[in-house]
Amino acid sequence: MPPALYALALAAFAIGSAEFIISGILPPLADDLAVSIPTAGLLVSAYAIGVAIGGPLLTLLTARIPPKTLIVTLLVVFALAQGLCALAPDYGLLLAARLLSSGAHGVFFGAGNVVVTRLVPFERRGAAYSLFISGITIANLLGLPGGTAIGNAWGWRMAFVAVGLLGAAAAVVLVFVLPATRDGEHRHSGFRAQLRALAHHQVLLSYLTITIVMVALLAFGTYQVPILLTVTGIDPAVVPLYLLLGGVGSVVGIYAGGRATDWRPMPALIAVLLLQALFAATMLWAVHDPVLMAVNAFLWGVTGFAFSTPLQARVLHAARAAPNLAASLVSTAFNIGIAGGALLGALLLNAGVSYAALPAVGIFCGLLAAGVAAFSWWLDGRTAAAG
């Protein structure tokens, strides 16, 4: 694979780590900035909203900028935003720096997807794309627990410094190894033509399913560190190991989801969503026992990521006339769910709901998502019969 692909994967790792790093450093950050943990958790919602809304808008505004120039500039902005996060003296300035970072995040993955397809021959594009998005997977495996460990050892601000340095390193490498676009190669499709390609139940209901699942995952995941500390009774030094277990589960889940996509995607998807609801229910008991919590964290990670590949493949197949816009809106659906989940968790906590009860959100959302997926599958059969 070209060196540029590895640099893009490093950038994806840094940007993916930045989104969820707040979850791992929530207690010390909230204490240092004199805000409640639910209020600090809203930094996750704000970031996700920035990606979901700012990303597509900025993508349209930057469509004519050559990809190499755009990607390097985005990574420089991202690195500077992490520096501002590390230096922020109060909550408001930290929030503003996070929003700046989220805008760069939203545009980067759309531009990166386009560049990846141009770096390798057509027959190797699948492998190249997998390498690129592996940066996000590894961010979940290592970025969150790694950032938590750095925050525990040297303070929460150093976690942002580490992520920013990774983004800056990727930018420097890409200056030298990412080919510039040749004349006539940089084009963009008409927005209206792409929008028409999205008007399909497989696309729209897949977006809805993604959003519902992410609400369930983030209503719990945003506050998992305070849950481990105050409910499960885990020593702070051991918390990164629990986060790592969840990350290993996510890697297994992505692999399993890919195999399921090649097998029977819709039955497998519905089964995964029902298992999410089941493990959300068992989490209500597991949070009180360190051993059960370790097992449940791994299983929660597996089912929490196994749903992704079948749904994204379904979207891209149904909207194959508009792959770039469809892919960017997948990110929007994910981040709407991320924002909604973190916000819902904060609202529940502020309303007096205990940390231990937050997994109950996953029961409702898992069943609802399974119902939406089953309805979409039923529409497939109806459409096929009508055709």
Image: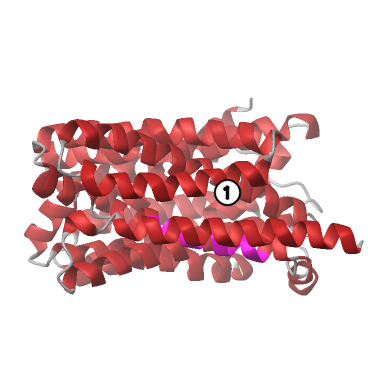
Task: Give the residue at x 34% y 65%.
Answer: 45
| Relative to 274, residue 52 above or below | below
Q: Is residue 212 magenta?
A: yes
Task: Give the residue at x 43% y 40%.
Answer: 13
Span of residues in magenta:
204-216
Q: Secondary structure at mark 1?
A: helix
| Relative to 336, residue 267 above or below | above
* Residue 154 pos. (x, y %): 12, 39
Q: Is residue 187 visible?
A: no
Task: Give the residue at x 18% y 37%.
Answer: 239
- Residue picked out by circle 1: 270
* Residue 348 pos. (x, y %): 23, 69
* Residue 112 pos. (x, y %): 59, 47
Q: How is the image coloured?
A: secondary structure
Task: Give the residue at x 92% y 61%.
Answer: 387
Q: Nearer the viewer, residue 322 or 346?
A: 346
| Relative to 311, residue 299 above or below | above
* Within-10-Å neighbours for mark 1: few <14, some 14–19, many 20+: many
| Relative to 90, residue 161 above or below | above
Q: Is residue 280 left or right of residue 270?
A: left
Q: What number of labels is visible?
A: 1
Q: Nearer the viewer, residue 195 or 164?
A: 195
- Amino acid on which the number 1 mark rests in the picture: Ile
Q: Main secondary structure of the magenta part?
A: helix
Q: Is residue 206 magenta?
A: yes
Q: Nearer the viewer, residue 178 or 354?
A: 354
Q: Is residue 128 visible?
A: yes
* Residue 125 pos. (x, y %): 72, 35
* Corner quadrant of residue 383: bottom right
